[in-house]
Image (cartoon, rainbow, N blue to C red):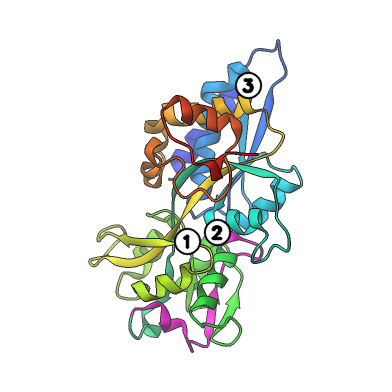
């Protein structure tokens, strides 16, 4: 993966340096992702590179930046420090509707496209596993990483655990680490587990199983009843099964849960630019597939499914041209 990213970044530099006409101003859009080790960052880099390769001659380029994830990305859009951002469905819903951590509706962004499923990976060292279910975290009384402060990982993790009656600070001693740092701490035995939601295969989880093996680390399961409890408040989660062989030594399916990730754009970005960007994404899906397996979930028929925020006018125009029927709740007012 790292080698591919190096190649992508090299391509990005070449295109932005040599492929743009000097006869017009170039608009370089910032795409906020998350910490390395998950899925947001490599996919964000891939989308930015694709934009540079295909749209630089039209004066549109992009740069992907790291961040703490969805929570910080909402702020970056608000403060105009980012133009596009990858967000969890949960955070998009909370922010736009003024729920959860948001005291009032945040109506400064639109949806562009659904991306892939953000799959919950609650991993735990095997010596602390009792049943293999998420409720093994109840009464754990060990250090557990719930993601960087202000991240989507922290936010969604708190919603999930709270819905199940698992109290952070009582049942778990919270540690605030990014994906790679969390896995390093698990491998070293400094923490008991971590939450690393992302599209499978998650690079950090692959490394965990490669280093410790499937006998020393586990990903916890969720029951249907637990899924129902979690989904009662926001209606964004659904069942997801991680197939055997997804991770080194994984012989059994893992019954977890997931929510959609989506690409958002702040208000004020020209609709014609958004139109060109979303058109470029869907006309070049094989390029994205070559970068990360999670992008196989990006399909035109899934482009507007599960979106928690109305569509940008440019994106809506493209989908209408493709014959998609857009529900009224996704039409920006």
Boundaries of the magenta span = 132-152
N-term mark: 2 or 1: 2
Q: For residue 17, which numbered disc appears in the image?
A: 3
46 to the left or right of 210? right
Residue 89 rendering spot, x and y as whole percentages: 53, 54
Circle 1 sits in a helix, a strand or a loop, which is it?
loop
Q: Which mark is residue 90?
A: 2
Foreground mark, 2 or 3? 2
Residue drawn 51% across the image and 31% down it: 278
> Is residue 101 one of those drawn in magenta?
no
Give the answer, above or below, for where 114 lies relative to 171. Answer: above
Residue 184: horizontal and vertical position, in percent? 50, 67
Judged by depth in the image, the label closer to the viewer, 2 or 1, is: 2
- Residue 257 visible to the viewer: yes
Crowding at dot 2, Cα within 10 Å, few <14 / some 14-19 / many 20+, comes out as many
Q: Are marks 1 and 3 in contact (CB under 8 Å)?
A: no
Answer with mark 1 or mark 3, whichever residue precedes in sequence: 3
């Amino acid at each position: 993966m790292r080698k591919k990213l190096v190649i992508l970044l090299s391509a990005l530099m070449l295109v932005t340096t040599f492929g743009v006409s000097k006869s017009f101003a170039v608009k370089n859009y910032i795409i906020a992702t998350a910490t390395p080790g998950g899925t947001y960052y490599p996919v964000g880099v891939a989308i930015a590179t694709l934009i540079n390769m295909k749209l630089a001659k039209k004066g549109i380029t992009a740069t992907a930046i790291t961040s703490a994830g969805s929570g910080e990305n909402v702020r970056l859009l608000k403060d105009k420090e980012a133009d596009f951002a990858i967000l969890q469905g949960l955070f998009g819903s909370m922010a736009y509707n003024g729920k959860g951590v948001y005291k009032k509706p945040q109506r400064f962004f639109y949806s562009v496209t659904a991306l892939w499923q953000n799959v919950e990976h609650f991993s735990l060292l095997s010596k602390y596993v009792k049943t293999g279910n998420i409720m093994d975290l109840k009464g754990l009384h060990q250090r557990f990483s719930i993601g960087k402060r202000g991240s989507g990982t922290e936010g969604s993790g708190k919603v999930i655990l709270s819905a199940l009656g698992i109290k952070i600070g009582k049942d778990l001693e919270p540690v605030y680490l990014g994906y790679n740092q969390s896995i390093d701490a698990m491998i070293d035995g400094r923490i008991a587990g971590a939450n690393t939601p992302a599209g499978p295969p998650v690079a950090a989880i692959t490394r965990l199983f490669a280093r410790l093996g499937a006998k020393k680390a586990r990903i916890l399961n969720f029951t249907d009843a637990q899924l129902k409890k979690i989904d009662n408040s926001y209606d964004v989660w659904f069942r997801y099964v991680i197939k055997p062989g997804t991770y080194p030594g994984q012989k059994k399916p893992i019954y977890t849960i997931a929510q959609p990730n989506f690409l958002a754009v702040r208000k004020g970005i020209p609709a014609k630019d958004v139109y060109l960007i979303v058109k470029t994404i869907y006309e070049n899906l094989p390029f994205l597939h070559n970068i990360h397996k999670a992008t196989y979930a990006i399909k035109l028929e899934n482009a507007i499914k599960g979106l928690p925020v109305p569509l940008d006018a440019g994106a809506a125009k493209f989908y209408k041209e493709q014959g998609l029927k857009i529900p009224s709740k996704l039409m920006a007012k």
